[in-house]
Amino acid sequence: MALHQFDRMVVEDEGDGPAVVCVHGLGGSGNTFTPLMPALIRHRVLRVDLPGSARSQRAEGALSIERFVQALRSMCQRLGVTQAAFIGHSMGTVVCQHLAAAEPALVQSLALFGPLMAPGDAARTGLRARAAKARNEGLAGMHEITQTLVGSALSSHTRQRLPLATAFVRESVMRQDAECYARTCEALAEAEAARVETIRAPVLLVTGDEDGVAPPQAVRSLAEKLHGARSTRVEVLARCGHWTPIERPEECQRGLRDFFAATQH
C-alpha cells in the first residue's frame, strides 16, 4: 500500500487492476470503505481523506462540494487515473454525482451508499447548528454530536447487536478536528444537487431501511431522476441505518461484486 500526501490531502493507494476511488461522508475517512475491500481485491483502490477530514485536517480555508470535486480531479491527474469506478458514502455521494455530471469520461460507474442529492431545508438548518456547536464547544461539542449521531444514524439492531460497528462510527466522528468538522458541515449545508439527469454511467444505490438521511423512498426517487444512466439498481438493506458499509459489510460487498460483474468489461 502506498500513502500519498499532496495539497494537504492524504490518499491510500492499494492493489492493481481497474481503478476504484472511494469518497467518504461527513465524519468519515478512507477507512469507511475498509469493510468493502474484500470485494475490490482485483482493483487499484484509492481511498481519499477529503480536505478537512481525518488525516487531511490541515486543509485551510472554506470547504465546499466544489472544492472536494476539484480535489478528486487533481488526485486523479497526479496519480495517472484516467477512468475509475467511484464509490461514495453519504456526503461523498453528492461529490461523486457532481463529478460524474462534470467529468463523464472519468467516471466509469457510481456505487453510492446512503445516497442523497442535497440536504433538505431542515437538514441544512441542523448542519449549520452542528457546525456552530463543534466550533464553539470543541471536544465537548464533538462528544455530544457523536452521541446524538450514534443514536440517530445507526439502526437499532446495529446499536444493540454490533458493538464493533457502533464503536467504529463513534471513533470516526470523535477523531475529527472540531473546526474542520464544522467547515465540512457548512460545506454540506450549502450543497446543491448535481444535474443527475446528465449522468450516463451505471449507478448502484444502496441504503438501509432505517436510514433517516437517505430513506428508501428518497433513494428510489433519485433513481428515477437518473434516467440518462446506462443502468440503475436500488438495494435496501434490512435492519440497517445510514452507515451501510459499516453496518452491513457482507451485503454491501455482495452488491458491489454483482454491480461490477454487470458493468465492468
Image (spheres, grey):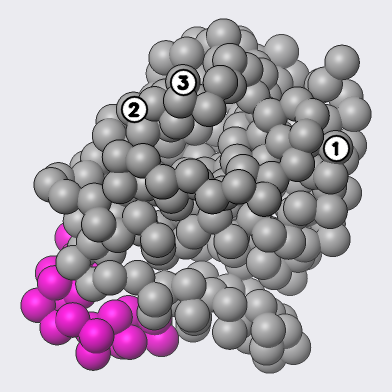
Residue at the disc numbered 1? 42
Rendered location of residue 264, percent (x, y): 82, 21
What span is in magenta? 124-147
**Does residue 213 appear anywhere in the picture?**
no
Is residue 127 highlighted in magenta? yes
Q: Which residue is drawn at the image coordinates 68% and 41% (left, top)?
A: 45
Residue identified by numbered label 2 = 70
What secondary structure is found at the residue carrying circle 2?
A: helix
Which badge, 2 or 3, comes first in the chain's sequence? Answer: 2
Residue at position x 67%, y 66% from top? 246
The structure residue drawn at horizontal position 44% and vertical position 37%, both measured from the top left corner, is 94
Whether residue 56 is visible, yes or no, is yes
Q: Residue at x 16, y 50 (%)?
A: 60
Measure the C-alpha gap from mark 1 to mark 3: 22 Å
> Of the residues under marks 1 and 3, which one precedes in the sequence?
1
| Spot occupied by residue 141 in the image (x, y as percentages of width and height) | 23, 83
Q: How crowded is mark 2: few (under 14 residues within 10 Å), some or many (20 or more)?
A: some
What whole-number distance in Å separates the C-alpha atoms at marks 2 and 1? 27 Å
- Residue depth check, mark 2 versus mark 1: number of the one nearer the observer: 1
Q: Residue 77 carries which label?
A: 3
Per the picture, the main secondary structure of the magenta-coloured stretch is helix
Residue 157: name its quadrant: bottom right
Q: Do the residues labelled 2 and 3 touch (CB within 8 Å)?
A: no
